[in-house]
Amino acid sequence: MGLFAVILEDLRTVKKNDPAFKSNLELFFNYPGIWALFFYRIANSLHRSNIPYLPRMLSGLGLFLTSIDIHPAATIGRRVFIDHGIGVVIGETAIIEDDVLIYQQVTLGGVSLDRNTKRHPTIKSGTVIGAGAKVLGNIIIGENARIGANSVVVRNVPENSTAIGIPARVIEKGFDKSPLSHNKIPDIDKEVFGYILKRLAVLENAVISKDTSSIDSKDHELEELYQAFLKSMKN
């Protein structure tokens, strides 16, 4: 697919992914992510043609106009949508495959100063990266993964999974594979506090009623929940 065909596809992607989209005129004023990709597509084409200086100048102009920093040497696939976009940083050796959704303040950054290595992450197709997330180093985010807002990801994330927290941990739970599914991200603090409250309730009832016969069965049930929670935290 040619350069301008890819740019037109980027424009159509906005209509598909943003329910707030109302008219084509909004593309010119309300979508800095589209403009950032526009400057990137041209700068990347020039970079791959080994033209010096101009690619970085174009990416600098795009950064000035959109507050989105995309290195011209990064690899970005088709139908990638940078929603809102302010503060997004995409490093030189980052690879983003098709149909990825990225929100504002996301960083795809490096943790090495070695110029001869891949320093930035690879984001597989269908991934959603929540606002403020930092994905750092030469790691792989698997297909259809979900990265929770403000998470810091420093190791691989398997496909079809959700990672949240600092540092991010993979939660072993299924999720609705709709384009966003942000409301499906589990609250691990809520889960562990719920477990503690249930255990206290069992013990209190046993003390008040002076009947300990139900403790064993209830305690076994809660222990299974607790072990499942620990297993998810170890990933």
Image: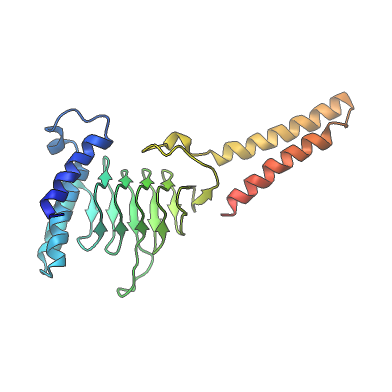
Quadrant in which the C terminus is drawn: bottom right
Q: Position of residue 70 (x, y in %)?
A: 23, 56
The answer to whether residue 190 is left or right of residue 120 is right
- Where, by quadrant of the figure, is residue 103 drawn? top left
Q: Residue at x 22, y 63 (%)?
A: 73
Horizontal placement of 165 versus 204: left or right?
A: left
One can see residue 64 in this view: no
Residue at the farthest right position: 210
Residue 21 percent coordinates (x, y): 21, 31
In the image, is residue 79 above or below residue 221? below
Q: Nearer the viewer, residue 14 or 210?
A: 14
Residue 179, image x and y in percent?
A: 36, 38
Q: Residue at x 30, y 54 (%)?
A: 97
- At 80% from the left edge and 29% from the top edge, which residue is drawn? 204
162, above or below 195, in the image: below
Tell me if I can see residue 19 in this picture.
Answer: yes
Q: How is the image coloured?
A: rainbow
Residue found at the far front of this picture: 1
Above or below residue 55? Residue 98 is above
Residue situated in front as seen by the camera: 116 or 127: 127
Quadrant where the N terminus sits is: bottom left
Residue at screen point 27% across, 37% down: 17
Relative placement, left or right, of 155 versus 107 is: right
Q: Position of residue 164 (x, y in %)?
A: 48, 47
Q: How many marks?
A: 0
